[in-house]
Image (cartoon, grey):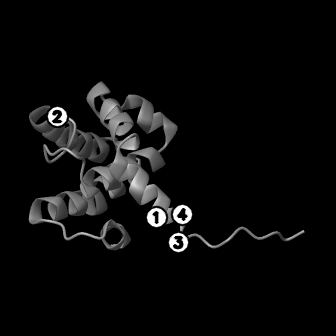
Amino acid sequence: GILKALWGQSVNSTTDDWLEFERTELRPALMSGNAKKIDKSVQKLASALEVHGVSVMGTEPLTLADVAITVTLLLSSKAIQQTLPPSIQTYVEITQNSPAYQQIKSLVSTLLPPATSYD
């Protein structure tokens, strides 16, 4: 999607798989409010972090997939965010402070229309 275009680099199949996880599993689960779906998605994410450390792919620097997953988690409700395992909360904090996250955040801001006043 749009994040891939903003990234400006090709993504490998593993990154693409994690982007698909974010789009087809994590995001719908968080939006549904269904505890079982949320738990399943969160557990998959936690398992990957347990194996790989600070990135779902075990890479440094963080990948586009990490940015997409983090944005989705940040857009979830505060109640959901507070119940995330500590490893995922740490992952979100690390990703938010990464150059990859900051790069995408600055690029996204260029896509927003200028502020207008309706006074």
- Residue lying at the far right in this picture: please name it: 119
Task: For marks 2 and 4, give the CA distance.
Answer: 29 Å
- Residue name at image x 14 percent, y 32 percent: 50
Q: Which residue position is annotated with label 1? A: 107
In what quadrant of the picture does the N terminus appear?
Answer: bottom left
Q: Looking at the picture, which amino acid does disc 3 mark?
A: Leu
Could you give the CA–CA distance between mark 3 and mark 1, rounded to whole angstroms?
Answer: 7 Å
Does the CB distance between marks 4 and 1 fall below 8 Å?
Answer: yes
Give the distance between the C-alpha atoms of the residues marked 4 and 3, in whole angstroms.
Answer: 5 Å
Of mark 1 and mark 2, the one earlier in the sequence is: 2
- CA distance for labels 3 and 2: 32 Å
Q: Residue 109, image x and y in percent?
A: 54, 63
For residue 29, say whether it is visible: no
| Disc 3 target residue | 111
> Where is residue 26 shown, x and y percent of the image?
30, 52
Q: Residue at x 42, y 37 (%)?
A: 80
Task: Give me the residue at 27% from left, 62% from top.
Answer: 24
